[in-house]
Amino acid sequence: MAELEVKERQAGDVTILDMNGAVRIGEGSIALRDAIRGLADGGKKKMLLNLAGVKYIDSSGIGELIANYTTVRRQGGQLKLLNLTDKIQSLLVITKLLTVFDVFEDEAEALKSFQ
Amino acid sequence: MEWLSERPCLNPVTEETTELSLPSRIETVAEAAAAVADFVSRSGVSDDAAFGIDMAVREAVTNAVVHGNSKDEDKVVDIILKSSPEAVEISVHDQGTGFNPNEVPDPTAEENLLKTSGRGILFMRNFMDEVVWFVPPEGGTTVRMLKRR
């Protein structure tokens, strides 16, 4: 089983990536990078990462998240987070990254924020 | 022994000890974490403590493999696990050129928030009760981490 499984779905012009597994150094971080770069290369500008199924992330995974966030923004796009587990949320509090990312608990509200 | 941290020496704990010596490659992080998870489950710590130990070990081994040993597979990462009724202690040693944690910029400072690295030490200190780095006589860097029960 892959460290991180990513499924893509579309809601209007927003692409939602449903993620399951772990975003950690190696395979998980690479899967996250590949998924987001794939969308950017395909001209997608609005991305919502649904992290409900992500139970683990390490500092490398967080670094990958930041790298992709800044790349997407530099290209004029938006990348937002949905459904953080308690543990991931606490890691973003520790790192003060909750002040950087737009984070949502409700998908409809998250989609509305892109308009 | 040159201490690189202002933190006090750790109290020795001795009841059960396991030692591992692993090659300097990324896969070692998961291998070490699995071995530590086994050890920790035998030690009977709480789920929250086990989660924190897993986080800290992965960060320590990542640092040893990537920064200490520069992924040179001729170099190894040595890990020593000790448990006692009071605590679990984990030491991770690399064969690098030495490391001073005080030189790592604060990743929570406003100007560093968008940096893509530098958060591992923050996690180690957050999830463990004591963390110290030192340069042993044989060289390299050892980080020793303690989680009290």
Image (tube, coloured by chain):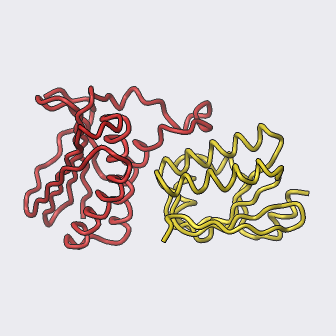
Q: Is residue B84 left or right of residue A106?
A: left
Q: Which residue lies at the image location 33% right of the left edge and 66% below the top edge? A: B50
For the point 80% across and 39% down, which residue is it?
A75
Please indicate whether residue A89 sits to the left or right of residue B50 in the image: right
- Quadrant assignment for the N terminus of chain B: top left
Who's the residue at 40% across and 50% down the image? B126
Does B113 sit above or below residue A23? above
- The picture places residue B42, in percent across and down from the top left corner, at 20, 73
What is the letter of the red chain?
B
Where is residue A49, by image quadrant? bottom right
Please say if B38 is above or below B64.
below
Give how far across and how far down residue B69 sits, in percent.
30, 35
| Quadrant of the rendering where the C terminus of chain B is positioned | bottom left
Q: Is residue B18 left or right of residue A79?
A: left
Q: Position of residue A30 (x, y in %)?
A: 55, 52
- Chain that is yellow in the image: A
